[in-house]
Amino acid sequence: MDKTEQLIAKTERLLAQIETLQATMQQVQSELRQHTQDLALQLTHVRKKAPETKQIRPLTTAERRSAPRRKGNPISVYINNGSPDADPLEGWVMDRSSGGLRLLVDEAMPAGTLLSVRPVKALPHLPWIQVRVKNCFPERKSWSLGCQFLHKMSWEELQHFG
């Protein structure tokens, strides 16, 4: 085999490799397009399911509430959204004031939602306490709900929340 024939053979091998690579690239591009479409569809479903949280965390750290917030040991609570068929959700009271509670929950709830809250370890005679969600913020893998009591709470009732 002379030098010319060797060059022709090498050129043909390289062309074959290029054709193989082009076919592989086309396949990868096709799979990537399909994957992009699947992701877009999944994102649309997630956005439709997620409740809107229109509240934005204020940039200021100034206290705006009329009663000071108290931290303490988190208190486990049941949370009912008013649906008679639904099992209560579980959450935690992270801080409290005479005006409301900050709850940590697994699901976002839009501002304005009415909830009933009751400590898990409450005595049977303690009624469910009604609150309104004022704001909702993501907190790690959970949601922080700023809630306001609908009725003025007695000191005895407040003590059940820590």
Image (spheres, rainbow, N blue to C red):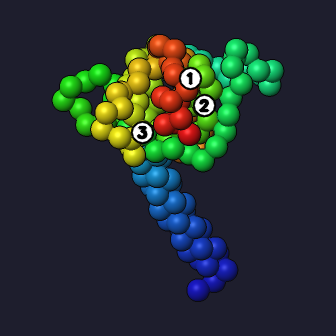
Residue 93 in the image, given as x and y percentages of width and height? 53, 38
Q: Residue at x 18, y 29 (%)?
A: 85
Residue 121 in the image, given as x and y percentages of width and height? 39, 46
Residue 109 in the image, given as x and y percentages of width and height? 45, 25
- Specify the farthest residue to the front: 156
The residue at which mark 2 appears reads as 96
Pick whichever of labels 3 and 2 is earlier in the sequence. 2
Q: Please state if 98 lies on the left or on the right of 153 as rendered.
A: right
Disc 2, SS? strand
**Residue 134 drawn above or below residue 136:** above
- Specify the farthest residue to the bottom: 1
Location of residue 102 (image quadrant): top right
Q: Please state if 38 lies on the left or on the right of 100 as rendered.
A: left
Q: Residue at x 81, y 21 (%)?
A: 62
| Contact? badges 1 and 3 (CB < 8 Å) | no
**Residue 162 drawn above or below residue 81:** below
**Residue 27 drawn above or below residue 78:** below
Q: CA distance from mark 3 to mark 2?
A: 13 Å
The residue at which mark 1 appears reads as 100
- Camera-nearest residue between 90 and 143: 90
The residue at which mark 3 appears reads as 119
- Camera-nearest residue between 47 and 107: 107
Q: Residues within 10 Å of mark 1 (few under 14, many from 20)?
A: many
